[in-house]
Image (cartoon, grey):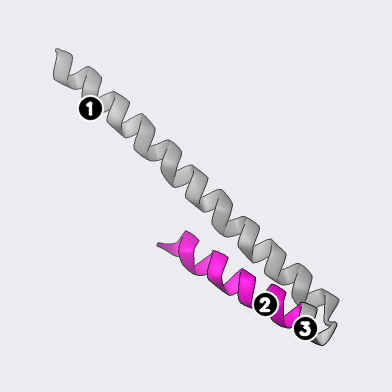
């Protein structure tokens, strides 16, 4: 769930930064959005590994 909040927070900062001309805030928003995306991919990878492990354990 943290990835969702990071992405949302990032998009808000990015939008406000763009609207106000605050390049620093815009960059910070992009960073937060990317952080959320990375967290999401890591969670997906964990899920795939756990599912594969459960499948292997089920075959024994």
* Residue span colored magenta: 1-17
Q: Mark 3 points at which residue?
A: 19
The answer to whether the residue labelled 3 contacts the one labelled 2, judged by CB atoms less than 8 Å apart, is no
At mark 1, the secondary structure is helix
As drawn, the residue found furthest toward the bottom would be: 20
- Residue 50 sits in quarter: top left
Helix, strand or loop at disc 3? helix
Mark-to-mark CA distance, 3 and 2: 10 Å
Q: Mark 2 points at which residue?
A: 13
Q: Is residue 6 above or below residue 60?
A: below
- The residue identified by callout 1 is 54
Q: In the image, what residue occupies the spot 22% across and 27% down? A: 54
Q: Is residue 9 magenta?
A: yes
- If you read the primary sequence from the N terminus, does the residue marked by circle 1 or circle 2 appear first? 2
- What secondary structure do most residues of the magenta stretch adopt? helix
Q: Residue 20 at what x, y percent from top left?
A: 80, 87
Tell me the mark number nearer the camera, choosing from 1 and 2.
2
Q: Which residue corresponds to the image point at 63% horizontal and 65% vertical from the top-left?
A: 32
Q: In which quarter of the image is the N terminus?
A: bottom left
Q: Which disc is residue 26 wearing? A: none
- Image position of 60 (left or right of 47): left
Residue drawn at the location 63% of the way across and 71% of the way down:
11
For residue 12, side relative to residue 51 (left or right): right
């Amino acid at each position: 769930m943290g990835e969702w909040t990071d992405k949302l927070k990032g998009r808000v900062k990015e939008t406000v930064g763009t609207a106000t001309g605050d390049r620093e805030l815009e960059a910070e928003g992009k960073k937060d959005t990317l952080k959320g995306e990375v967290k999401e991919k890591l969670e997906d990878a964990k899920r795939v590994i756990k599912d594969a492990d459960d499948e292997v354990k089920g075959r024994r």
